Image (tube, rainbow, N blue to C red):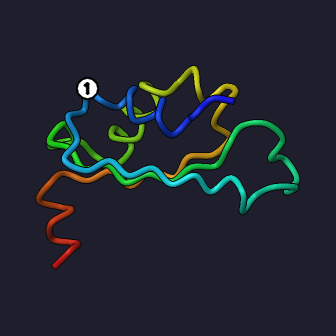
Amino acid sequence: MKDVSRIIIERLGELDAEKLEIVDESEKHRGHAGSGGGGHYSMTVVSDRFSGQGLMARHRLVYGMLSDLMKKDIHALAIRAYTPSEYQSKQS
């Protein structure tokens, strides 16, 4: 069995993230209609690479880095992508 969370972290390494947290939420979705195959994941990623990018561009960047996993290993992925200053302001 693949450790998909570990693979996600490796794939997103080039973002040089200050924070990268992956939560496997697959257990919450067992038996739900349409959940056959692939896990459910939630992520928070904080990177300077998101500076100057809108929400959609950030998501496209992450999905692009994980595209082959999205076909089989990941059924759903919730992404919270911030620049360091955005993340810092959310923590205050």
Answer with the quarter of the image where residue 10 lies: top left
From the image, tell me which residue sits under label 1. 14
Specify whether 12 is left or right of 29. left
Q: Residue at x 32, y 47 (%)?
A: 20
- Return the residue found at the far top: 68
Specify whether 56 is left or right of 87. right
Instruction: Name the amino acid, label 1.
Output: Glu
- Percent from the top left, x then y, of residue 83? 18, 51
Q: Residue at x 84, y 47 (%)?
A: 34
Specify whether 44 is left or right of 54. right
Say which quadrant the N terminus sits in.
top right
Answer with the quarter of the image where residue 2 lies: top right
Q: Residue at x 38, y 52 (%)?
A: 21
- Percent from the top left, x then y, of residue 88? 15, 66
- Return the residue found at the far front: 1
Specify whether 80 is left or right of 68. left
Q: Residue at x 41, y 41 (%)?
A: 59
**Between 23 and 53, the one nearer to me in the picture:** 23
- Percent from the top left, x then y, of residue 85? 11, 59
**Between 74 and 7, the one nearer to me in the picture:** 7
Residue 50, placed above or below residue 70: below
